[in-house]
Image (cartoon, rainbow, N blue to C red):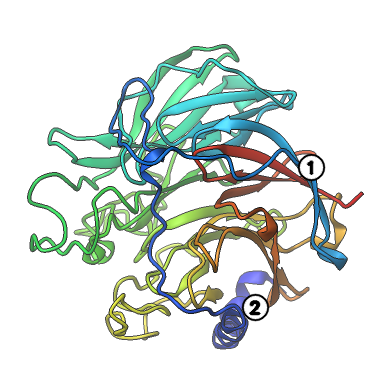
Amino acid sequence: MQLTRSIAMTASWAVAVGAFVGLAFETSGTARQAQPTAAAQTPAPGARGGGRGPAPTDTLGTGPWDLGTGRGRVHVEVVTKGLDHPWGIAFLPDGGLLVTERPGRLRVVRNGVLDPAPIGPLPEMLATGLGGLLDVALHPRFAENRLIYLAYSKPGAGQGNATTAVFRARWDGGATLSDGRDILVADAYHGGPGTGPGSGDGSLGPASGSYGSRLAFDANGFLFVTLGDRNIPPKAQEPASHIGKILRLRDDGTVPPDNPFVGRAGYKPEIYTLGHRNPLGLAFNPVTNDLWSTEQGPQGGDELNLIQAGKNYGWPRVSLGRNYDGTRVGEGFTAAGYEEPVVYWVPAIAISGLTFYNGDKFPQFKGHAFVGGMRNNTGQHLQRVQFNAQGLPTGRELMLQELRQRMREVKQGPDGFLYVLTDETFGAVLRVEPPR
């Protein structure tokens, strides 16, 4: 049975399972979108922003570690440290890694050694709050054309005004990018004087949050881009804005003619889905080719969603979380016409990256999803979401929580191991291997 059909037939059951398992992790307190510490805001050259705060400390240690028990026991190695809030990772054909740092640097790691020289030039970006340099992806034919893609927060004309953009450039493996240009500048500008809570613009938080933005290519070479709601929730339901949407583009940024809203009056033609709060994980299941996304909720209601063309995922009209004052979001937990998550978390874990495992190093994990968590107490771990042979969620397992690190991204590498980025000022790339 196809996974998509299975999920559609059992949506209510899946949500019930999510609620049951989610309650097993419930603790006191409220969940808010995870914000960085002031010490993290050290922009790279060419990046606006900055800040001061207490001197940060390295809380990870040097490793390696053997963690967990039973089927979930793993060995964890530090691939490299010395990264400031690493955000995105891409695997190179020669075995190296490209890693983004949110303050505005693109780095390369070869044989476990972090090259001290950042790669550039990069476009100017607004590296404040949760903005800066975000995800990185390789073109599906990277070995031939050497094209890389970078998502970032692009400053506008006004102070603090920014949007999400995607930059494409050619990289020959050295320290220099060439032929760089924006292939997407989203219609999602927000921020600056006269914006924010109390301004009357619908903002519920700082404009420096909820940018998204994950990148993923499908098997046909189309690029998917997630955009957050920038803390102005009503915009996620406005079809004339890119805010709170997942977009689908050709590799040059143009619009595919079969996008679901092409030719529909009042809709941006790039939109693939709408009604998203802050999708921070995006991945294709390599077996079914279905697209999935993780999305941060408000007080509770973090989500794992099956992404289908033209669907509305409800924010801010419905949510399985609650507003920060305890009231229901919009129309409540669910309503006709809106997609329900396949799995959700109450309370929130500040959900982040996403990958589906299909390697040979962990045969017991095949078909399972891995997500990152960043929230103190309920997050700061890697979590395995188990699916059965019918594609239905059946349970969860917390992993790496002993490290007490914010887990920003998780991806399966070409070698079959799992790679995790820690969202810390002293950030690291971790490799998760079978136990020794």
Whole-Å distance between the Cαs marked 2 and 1? 40 Å
Task: Indicate left or right for 43 with 107 as reference.
Answer: left
Residue 6 circle label: 2
- Against 256, residue 20 (above or below) is below
Q: Residues within 10 Å of mark 1 (few under 14, many from 20)?
A: few
Identify the amino acid type marked 1.
Answer: Pro
Q: Position of residue 14 (x, y in %)?
A: 60, 82
- The quarter of the image holding the N terminus is bottom right
Tell me the residue that label 1 is attached to: 64
- Against 424, residue 265 (above or below) is below
Image-quadrant location for residue 58: top right
Q: Residue at 37% across / 80% down in the picture?
A: 337
Q: Residue at 53% across / 74% down in the picture?
A: 345
Q: Residue at 72% across / 27% down in the picture?
A: 112
Q: Position of residue 99 (x, y in %)?
A: 56, 32
Q: Residue at 72% across / 38% down in the picture?
A: 62
- Against 329, residue 129 (above or below) is above
Q: Position of residue 306 (x, y in %)?
A: 54, 67
Indicate which disc, 2 or 1, sits on the residue closer to the N terminus: 2
Residue 343 circle label: none
